[in-house]
Amino acid sequence: MGRYRVEGGYPIAGEMETKGSKNGVLPILAAVLLTESEVILHHCPLISDFFLTLEILKSLGCRIKRDGRTVIIDASFADKSSIENEIVQKMRSSIIFMGALLGKYGEACVGYPGGCEIGVRPIDLHLKAFREMGVTIRDEKGFIYCTSKSINGVKINLDYPSVGATENILLLASKAKGQTIVYNAACEPEIVQLAEFLNACGAKITGAGTECIVIDGVQRMHGTEFTIFPDRIEAGTLLCAAAITGGEIHLKKVKPDDMRQTLLRLDEVGCKMIEGQNEIYLKAPRVLRPVDIIYTGPYPNFPTDMQPQMMSVLTLARGTSIISETVFEARFKHIAELCRLGADIHVEGQTAVIKGVKKLQGCHVIGRDLRGTAALILAGLSAEGETVVENSQYVERGYEEFEKTLTALGAKIRLEKSGDRYNEKEDTFTTR
């Protein structure tokens, strides 16, 4: 547990390189289990979810060595098909190990996942797809037991383009017998990245990034060397930080095409932007403009992971904006805290009406999920006086030393935390 103390009124300005993608690296770490020789991953984000995922791999028997943002993993020593429930409860994305474990052993035991409080997030689409591929599933005392004598390729039509379900299917289908075709697949850049990694290891996947993905199963997969894509959500968050504080920022190691909807909305509020192949420059306007309405949705629509940060920006826009959250039913928990800071936001169901105010006033607020807590920090950067944001552990799940990143860009922010950060030593995960 910890808290951020933010002194508002200092514009975000400067140059920064975006870290590796949180949502990209986690399924790739699970995919490593399918390989039979050493994997080297570069540009990994040093966030708590990354370290928790390494802990899962370590508990399964993998040999791991980390040097800065590079991690070397040998999954040939893995000898377990179940994950400790204590770890699973800390991180929603641990469910992605089901597909990898089934692909490796033909069996898996995983507890129901935890994570941020942003809604029910059922895993029924994952389980339905597994059953169609020949997996027997039973639920006992909070654990999901999966077994199969033969994983078979099939045609799967997802009722919703779920990122997690698509990733789990890719993992399992890569080792299935025959061909799997996924219709209504998720199209997020993280899906493309996972497919590129799996193909580099010997898988045969085509169509990633479209609504129809074809996977031809293979018997064996080898190791590879791979660089994690930049984090489009971290990049968007930093752009919003500059926008809400009247600053300017030059981001490097970004992929503008992967965050097009975020950039379009920042343009709509009046930000001046210049794009390069792997960089973005943003300068905030003197007065922020409102947007008519933002609907969150599956890629390429506006990402739900950017909704809270954009809402913080819109609290200071001159006019009324509307945001409709269509992905997670409980992703408005930051609104009450924004209102404590002086925002004028009215909620009806899954729609928020934001009436811009002239200024925000620093106070004590509580974060309840990763992106919502980051949004409160952004609001604090622009507020008068000091803002204290509780529950730093949420931010540490997805942003590497967020306070240091913001400080390097001119912010006045510090983290108050008892104890050390999560397993920062280079050799923490050296095993056997």
Image (spheres, rainbow, N blue to C red):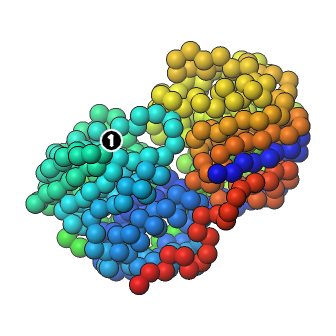
Task: Pick the quarter of the image with the C terminus.
Answer: bottom left
Horizontal side of 245 relative to 231 (left or right) equals: right
Work out which residue is located at the far bottom of the displayed protein and give it: 432
Q: Would you identify the image quadrant in which residue 70 lies? A: bottom right
Examine the rendering and report whether any part of residue 192 can be seen: no
Q: Is residue 98 above or below residue 367?
A: below
As drawn, 254 above or below 68 = above
Q: Give the tally of numbered discs.
A: 1
Please state the horizontal and vertical placement of residue 420, each as a whole percent of the image: 67, 65
Q: Position of residue 10 (x, y in %)?
A: 88, 45
Residue at position x 81%, y 45% from top? 6
Residue at point 88%, 34% (across, down): 384
Callout 1: few (<14), some (14-19), or many (20+) C-alpha neighbours within 10 Å?
Answer: some
Question: Who is closer to the viewer here, 397 or 72?
Answer: 397
- Of residues 140 and 156, the one nearer the viewer is 140
Q: Which residue corresponds to the image point at 59% horizontal and 44% vertical from the top-left?
A: 370
Amino acid at the residue labelled 1: Ile
- Give the residue displayed 55% in from the left and 48% down from the top: 258
Tell which residue pokes out farthest to the left in this image. Answer: 149
Q: Is residue 417 visible?
A: yes
Left or right? Give the position of 376 relative to 32. Answer: right
Which of the two residues, 289 or 113, is positioned nearer the viewer here? 113
Q: Secondary structure at mark 1?
A: loop
Left or right for 342, reference 47:
right
Residue ID for mark 1: 123
Residue 44 location (% of width, % of height): 55, 66
Give residue 421's position: percent from left, percent from top: 65, 63
Quadrant location of residue 400?
A: bottom right
Instruction: Identify whether 45 is placed above or below 246.
Output: below
Q: Left of 373 or right of it: where is 432?
A: left
